[in-house]
Amino acid sequence: MMERNNLNDTFKIDEMKNLTRIIALLAVTGAIVAVNGCKPKGPQEAVVGNAAAKVYVAPGKYDEFYNIVSGGFNGQMSIYGIPSGRLLRIVPVFSQFAESGYGFSEETKPMLNTSHGFVPWDDLHHIALSVTNGEHDGRWAFGNGNNTPRVARVSLKTFKTEEILELPNSGGNHSSPFITENSEYIVAGTRFSVPVGDNRDVPISSYKQNFKGTISFIKIDPASGRMNIGFQLKTPGVDFDLSRAGKGPSHGWFFFSCYNTEQAYTLLEVNATQKDKDFIMAVNWKKAEEYIAQGKGEKVKAKYAHNVLDEKTHTATSEMMTEVLQLDPTVLKDIIYFIPCPKSPHGCDTDPSGEYIVASGKLAALIPVFSFSKIQKAIADKDFEGEFAGIPVIKYESALHGEVKKPGLGPLHTEFDNEGNAYTSFFVSSEIVKWNVKSLEVLDRVPTYYSIGHLSVPGGPTRKPHGKYVIAYNKITKDRYLPTGPELTQSAQLYDISGDKMQLLLDFPTTGEPHYAEAIPASLVMPNSVKIFKIEDNNHPYAAKGEKEAKVVRKGNEVHVSMTAIRSHLVPDNIEGIKLGDVVYFHVTNLEQDWDVPHGFAIKGAANAEILIMPGETQTLKWIPDEVGVSPFYCTDFCSALHQEMQGYARVSAAGSNTPLKFSTGVIAEEAKSSPK
Amino acid sequence: MKYLFLLGVVVLAFACAPKKPKGPVEEYPEQPATKSAVEEVIANPTKGIGAVKNVTLKTPLEAGRVERGQAIYDMKCGACHKLTDQRLVGPGWKDVTKRRQPEWIMNMVTNVDVMLDKDPEAQKLFELCLVRMPNQNISIGDARDILEFMRKNDGEK
């Protein structure tokens, strides 16, 4: 380091260095521009005008929308603020989450129970927010588990997973959890058809004969949100991809995209892309309800788990269900119809009016838009081109409103604004295309960076979209952020759609792999947000509601510690009399009744996680000590100036030793003849 | 350099006295924290700030209140306040009803965030204890019961 006696000299040197850097940078930029000359123009040109001001949410101010985003392979939901793109919370749903102890604590383990036992991971693809009269009501967010078929319900009051329902007779739950306009049902369509029932050990090559699809209609209790399978439709063996409920005039119907109508079972890349057209499947679920009312459903044996969190005991329970009500639409006519659709359709989206169904053939060079009223007329007139596996197939032209010609490459999903326009994502050509639903005219297109999958307009799937923005969830992120090795974060992009031209405003990184997401005005969620759990209402069997109730009880080789946490101590903080071979349960109750004051608990050697306990809540960490000695435990969430003092010791003695069981806090050795309370 | 130093001092001066964000206060609309609240302290230094303006104490003690107050103490207060004069996280409760006006006690219990931010007596205790007394979500009725239990603890009959 040179001495800085002469400030001017130092500045000159710095200036020269900077100048050199700038020149070098310009040269490099020039080179990059030259190399990339024929690629699409970069984002620098895409972002114009007052983009920064439009996404800037000043410190202390709130975002206008909650963006509830699926986490894909991380099995979680993440909550972002829009327009800032700030990550507000990660809600663990189908995956254990060591940060909070979800799936590790004794209270939450039952949430991840299935007919296969404890399955601590799933692939959460799509979000459905609860609706009333086709509009967001801000009560629940549903998510699907794609791999071990499940649907979860998350409370938008607590942002906790409150319920998970497994789906029997399903090969993978992709076409899910789309919702009817009064949250009567959410659906779960199997992605993979599989052999179901008693005859399951069959040659794979017997697909056409033995493989079936199922669509489950999950009934939602309007008061509690509790789910149960209302009925299950058995369908021909195909792959179900995505779906949407009808709304308004089409309420009572549901639409599903199907691919692999070739019924291939190997190298689907080739063998399931043979036909020019696959299907949209239209389901008349009101008709299905009529058949059930007439007693025409068949109860079949099935094994699936139903897991529910009790908000008073802060504890989940898992019940194994044993049967499901099935309907066979090849026997019970008028429930389902197929509509031919080019080619390997993916997204299947109904517009806010409920009249138009947009199907995105991901390998097609056009977007067909079907008309609900034409579908109804075709059904009434029996305007069919034939049958597929016993199900009538409506003539393509008879159901068609029209086609969007040459919109782009690889259309996937469509969302809507409040002015009759549609926004379709194009994976292959990396763009969002805006078009008019009635006129089918392309109005605008913007590039995405890169390979967009799903997209979301606030309120986009409802009868009254909130509009304003479209958010792109991109699959490829290369060159958008500082590199972090081979793996890059997935990237979302925010566009202003309030004008005629879409305007790119912001990139923001996301966690996991977002598939579908919904955005909802903060005003519908924020006022109901729970700040604390009332300790008076805590019915956890091991809760210590006050330090007087703190205790340690031995039951055989189980040791149950009912512990309290408050700034800045734990009661008890000295525990003796635990022996090797014991299983210790720390039931920790947070006595605080103040917002944003969780306490944490961790003990050395615990082979699971920490637990985070919200104000007024009780959570349990299981600990099996594996050595004689004294193990420290402490609060893991910095809670006060004396947080570091919030600690304690558990003494573990040899098996068979006669160390008496005792516990205390604040007792100094000379006085420690007995416990203080 | 001199100016830089001066700037540093100015920044430090501000850094030491951060303004409390208004957010948390606005979360409790039933307990308005207005400018007049500060004036109220000056006008009436002993009753504290909050919804509780006048409390009528009865003799003998109301047994039902004492019992309920003790139950709330055990659940929500006892972790930090002993019934003796020993300070734990917060001050011991012995003789608190002799040191404070009943209104001040109830406002402290029900309007703790505003009291810690604006009431000089509450702030003295905060400086002593260095842990913000938590808002334990106690209603005014509950606070009245707690007060009755405090009176019993202080030997009133």
Image: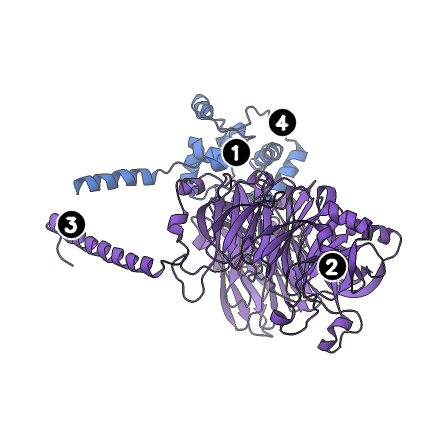
Chain colours: A purple, B blue
Could you say where residue A224 lies in the image, as x and y percent from the top left?
Answer: 71, 47
Dot 1: chain letter: B
The reply to whether the C-beta atoms of the residues labelled 4 and 2 are less than 8 Å apart is no
Left or right: A650 with respect to A240? Answer: left
| Quarter of the view holding residue A114 | bottom right
Q: Quadrant of the N terminus of chain A?
A: bottom left
Dot 2: chain letter: A
Dot 4: chain letter: B
Residue marked by disc 3: A11
In the depicted view, which residue is nearer to us: A442 or B69?
A: A442
Could you say where residue A318 lies in the image, as x and y percent from the top left?
Answer: 71, 60
- Which three-letter amino acid code belongs to the residue tagged 3? Phe
Please tell me if label 4 and label 3 are on a single chain. Answer: no
In the depicted view, which residue is nearer to us: B111 or A176?
A: A176
Q: Distance of mark 2 from mark 3, alpha carbons?
A: 72 Å
Mark 3 lies on a secondary structure that is: helix
Q: Is residue A485 above or below residue A13?
A: below
Which numbered disc, 1 or 3, marks the residue closer to the eye? 3
Upstream in the sequence, badge 4 or badge 1? 4
Residue marked by disc 2: A215
Q: Is residue B92 above or below residue A126?
A: above
Q: Distance of mark 1 from mark 3, alpha carbons?
A: 55 Å
Q: Distance of mark 4 from mark 2, alpha carbons?
A: 71 Å
Residue marked by disc 4: B59
Could you say where residue A517 lies in the image, as x and y percent from the top left?
Answer: 57, 51
Which numbered disc, 4 or 1, marks the residue closer to the eye? 1
| Quarter of the view holding residue A346 | bottom right
Mark 4 lies on a secondary structure that is: loop
